[in-house]
Image (cartoon, rainbow, N blue to C red):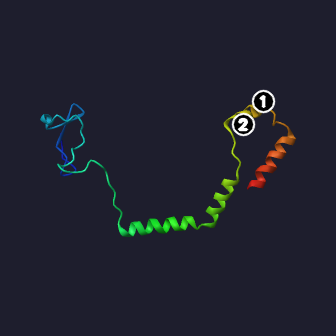
Amino acid sequence: MNIRPTSPYATPAAEVGGVRAEANATSGRTSSSPAPPAGADSEDRVELSAQGREAAQASALARASDPDLEAARVGLRAQPEISPARVQELREAIADGAYDTPEAIDAIAGALTRRL
């Protein structure tokens, strides 16, 4: 079965025993991906149109001025840091049943509903 190249820079490939092989075995290449044309940069690049750049700027401005997003940022910054050691202590306390009392459950439920 012959497979036609999908770009002008691709080399024809052949399927041999279920394995795709380069038709030009003398090139010394071991990859099935095509070589870039002579003189081409080896880096990938993306160029946005003027309309795309304007849309990206408008989106960034909308995000920066969104009051709900800003309130979320302020709330997140106000949260105290918690160390991994403290998290481990809490996990162990939960596993040991320290919070399996009606009073603890009510306190936790109250704290959660106040945050909503």
Q: Where's residue 70, x and y in %?
A: 63, 62
85 left or right, relative to 29: right
10 left or right, relative to 98: left
Q: Where's residue 7, x and y in %?
A: 21, 51
Is 48 rendered above or below residue 2? below
Q: Which residue is mark 2?
A: 86
Find residue 34 and report its image quarter: top left
Is 55 rendered above or below residue 20? below
On residue 96, the disc is 1
Q: Residue at x 87, y 42 (%)?
A: 103
Secondary structure of the residue carrying tag 1 is loop
On residue 65, the disc is none
Bin the neighbour count of mark 2 within 10 Å (Cα to Cα): few under 14, some 14-19, many 20 and up. Answer: few
Is 40 rendered above or below residue 95? below
What type is the residue that disc 1 sits on? Asp
Q: Where's residue 45, x and y in %?
A: 32, 54
Nearer to the camera, 76 or 68: 76
93 left or right, relative to 69: right
Q: Residue at x 82, y 36 (%)?
A: 100
Q: How many marks?
A: 2
Disc on the earlier residue, 2 or 1: 2
Which of the two marks, 2 or 1, is nearer to us in this view?
Answer: 2
